[in-house]
Image (cartoon, rainbow, N blue to C red):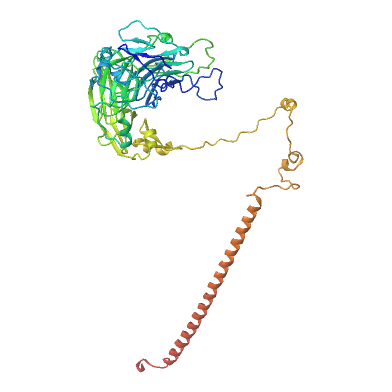
Amino acid sequence: LLPPVKSLSGSTNTVAGEGTMKDSIPCLSVKARPVRMPPGYQADLVIQLVWVDGEPPQQITSLAVNSAYGLVAFGNCNGLAVVDFMQKTVLLSMGTLDLYGSSDPYQRQPRSPRKSRQFAAGLTELSDSPVSLELERCKSPTSDHVNGHCTSPTSQSCSSGKRLSSADVSRANRRGPGRPPFRKAQSAACMEISLPVTTEENRENSFSRSRSSSVSSIDRDSKEAITALFFMESFARKNDSAVSSCLWVGTGLGMVIILSLNLPASDDLRQSEPVMVSPSGTVLTLKGAVLTFACLDCMGTLTHQPYEVWRDPHSADDGDKTRKRKLVMHSPSSSQDMGDHQFAVICSEKQAKVFSLPSQTCLYVHNITETSFLLRADVVTLCNSVCLACFCANGHIMTLSLPSLRPLLDMNYLPVTDMRIARTFCFTNEGQALYLSSPTEIQRLTYSQEMCDNLQDMLGDLFTPVETPEAQNRGFLKGLFGGSGQAFDREELFGEATAGKASRSLAQHIPGSGGIEGVRGAAGGVIGDLTRARIALDERGQKLGELDERTASMMASAEAFSKHAHEVMLKYKDKKWYQF
């Protein structure tokens, strides 16, 4: 059993023994012996969500990885976690409501907890006394637990995080009514994170959504899910004069939270110095669940995320010497004019907004749909420009110009009748899109006229014709000492095949369709052909007989007509014209 947890008010929380047997127990066990891995991708780090207060881990709703920062962030309906996969350390494990701090636009006051549902296993009894709630409200909104220690942007002292072999990450989370505390995450070879479990109801002032019954029933759940994550070099606060590493977090209620990442100044210190993650206090709002982020420079050019150039870890070029990481950063130039340096593009299920940074001024807003909702939105390049491509649940494909959000295209393509399309639809550059039409088929489409004009030139072949390679010549020494003799054909050595003539002493077997059944089938086919030919001959003979009879009848008629004409001629032969 877990030990009793002390609350902020000083009271002791009792833990029911029957319901917490699975708490902090990982789903995967670590093997102490070496394990043979098959060829292919190899796992470098395993991060597990553990049971908390008798509830299993919730499904991960969003995940983002950045190789330049060495961080992976993921979230679910309970909260957000940020893990340093270079130092094997948990940097952040926080509930969604705690990410707002004092910047919560709803300004909710603590209220009495509702009656939570009865689990089969007992839950932790929480003490929500007014004293503890008051203490929780008085906490710094930017304070955060990093590597097991509480740090803030103004604090200077911070202990380095624990390694993977001794991961013991826990924090006393600021929680609302009915929210249990964080549990410890312990493992010897894999990392475990306990995201908070909340039973708090939906915000009373949450944005209304026109969704289908199946989707809206999920969205009305009592937990605000993390729906979008994006790493980029941006301005975290209004008074920032230079860009810094940031993590943009989007929630299911249309809230955008910016987290500030404090990375070591030199990449050489990346393995030794800790990474600080703290909420910046910036909160932006949209209508509907957030789907995607993008960053444009002052000229409207798409700014990509920083990344590390891939290198083979098993390469022997440098031997035992440790190679430096090659990072590609896409930071804007420092010689630009004062003022707003970036455009942040945010798209939700209902609308798209363009913010100017660092002033955080909303420059453009466009309500994409009112009666439906977006399934997918991506910022892509098309015809040497950047646009926002959207796929709506009613089957419409729409494109908007950036940063002005002017509608460029609205086309009814395909209503979503299969959830596979909604899950797999994605946009690519140059006006293309892909989705799985079936478990084994990929459907590719384009909404670019230039792509349609060059479509025939881009069609490829399923197979590439390759000539059959010749047999390798067997060397003399290999044949002499190889131990296995080469099989020779007597006809090839002594027959007439080498002279270019067919062999007269051997019968050549020509493989056919095979078997007696094939012969019977062939014989049956021949008999059928003969029967049909005989029937055709009989019909031809009958037709010839009828033709002969008609010919004889015509000849008789011709003779009668000739005789009658001769008689008429003889009758009027000797008569004059005046005798008629």
Residue 393 is situated, as x and y percent measured from the top left of the image, at 32, 36
Residue 35 higher or lower than 526, as above or below = above
Quadrant in the picture for residue 457: top left
Give the number of marks: 0
- Quarter of the image containing the N terminus? top left
Farthest residue to the top: give it: 157
User: For this rendering, which residue is in front, 155 or 377?
Assistant: 155
Residue 67 is situated, as x and y percent measured from the top left of the image, at 41, 18
Residue 51 higher or lower than 519, as above or below = above
User: For this rendering, which residue is in front, 224 or 129?
Assistant: 129
- Quarter of the image containing the C terminus? bottom left
Residue 223 is situated, as x and y percent measured from the top left of the image, at 32, 26
Quadrant in the picture for residue 91: top left
Residue 535 higher or lower than 553, as above or below = above
Query: Is residue 298 something that shows in the picture?
Result: no
Residue 346 is situated, as x and y percent measured from the top left of the image, at 29, 25
Position of 187 with respect to 227 (left or right) is: right
User: For this rendering, which residue is in front, 214 or 416?
Assistant: 214
Query: Is residue 574 something that shows in the picture?
Result: yes
Quadrant in the picture for residue 340: top left
